[in-house]
Amino acid sequence: MDLKNRPIWLFPVIAAVLAGLAAILLLTLSGQNPARSGSPNAAPVRMSGEADIGGAFTLVDQTGQTVTDADFAGRPMLIYFGFTYCPDICPTSLQVMAAALDRLPEAQRAQFQPLLITVDPERDTPEALASYVDSPAFPEGLTGLTGSEEQIRDAARAYRVYYRRVEDDGTLAEYTMDHSSLIYLMGREGEFVEVFPHQATPDQIASRLQQFLDNNPA
């Protein structure tokens, strides 16, 4: 091919096509599905099976008591990683969780243990979590969990949660936290069942929770 005689505008087009193919290849090799995260109408992400998500953790609840994953054995858990200074995404996700649970009969709703695990242990002390999780807009019985930086890092790693500190401009707070926004459904013995993306609706989540209970009675 004689590249010297090709129109100049053709080179950016070729480069863009090659970049797109490389991105698709990278997503394919990494096991990611771009349709899951980009669509505002995305359904809950079905990842049942032997996914390597979840595991043992040792943290501190909003009363100051040390708890482990074993303390919740026998109850399916709905876990969200967030922080109390989060301006919108975290409270919205917890409200969606609450709305989904409210769609279940009381006896079924009571089987689930909702958990908020902070990604900001520096500010989210047990006292801070205690006042936060008590909000009537959040799920009834929501337990807040914090711990040392290492304990939070280990828990986030087990659940494949991304988070990092972002320095703010000082107008609202000293810093904020960038983090993934997912609700994890874990089985009665802590096994991974499913993850719901930020776009999942209360109806979608409630339907899946109902299906889980039907297939996994107490």
Image (tube, grey):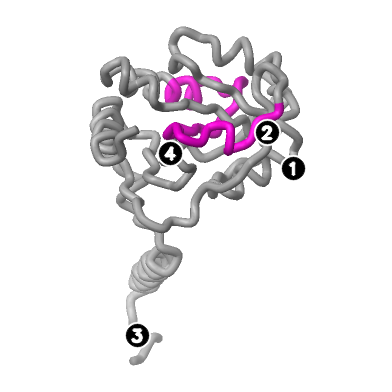
Tag 3 or tag 2, which sits nearer the N-term?
A: 3
Residue at x 49%, y 51% (from the top left corner): 53
Tag 1 or tag 4, which sits nearer the N-term?
A: 1
* Residue at image mark 3: 5
* Residue at image mark 2: 59
Tag 2 or tag 1, which sits nearer the N-term?
A: 2
Q: Which residues are magenta?
A: 66-94
In the picture provided, is 70 more to the left or to the right than 152? left
Query: Looking at this rendering, what residue extends furthest in the top direction?
Result: 136
Query: Which of label 4 and label 2 is nearer to you?
Result: 4
Residue 20 in the image: above or below residue 43: below
Residues under numbered marks 1 and 2 in contact, where contact means CB atoms less than 8 Å apart: no
CA distance for labels 4 and 3: 67 Å
Looking at the image, can residue 161 be seen?
A: yes
Residue 187 at x, y percent in the picture:
41, 41
Name the kind of residue labelled 3 in the image: Asn
Quarter of the view holding residue 40: top left
Which of the image's four quarters has the C terminus? top left
Residue at x 34%, y 92% (from the top left corner): 1
Residue 13 in the image: above or below residue 158: below
Looking at the image, can residue 16 be seen?
A: no
Name the kind of residue labelled 1 in the image: Glu
The label on residue 188 is 4
Tag 3 or tag 1, which sits nearer the N-term?
A: 3
Tag 2 or tag 4, which sits nearer the N-term?
A: 2
Query: Which of label 2 and label 3 is nearer to you?
Result: 2
Name the kind of residue labelled 2 in the image: Leu
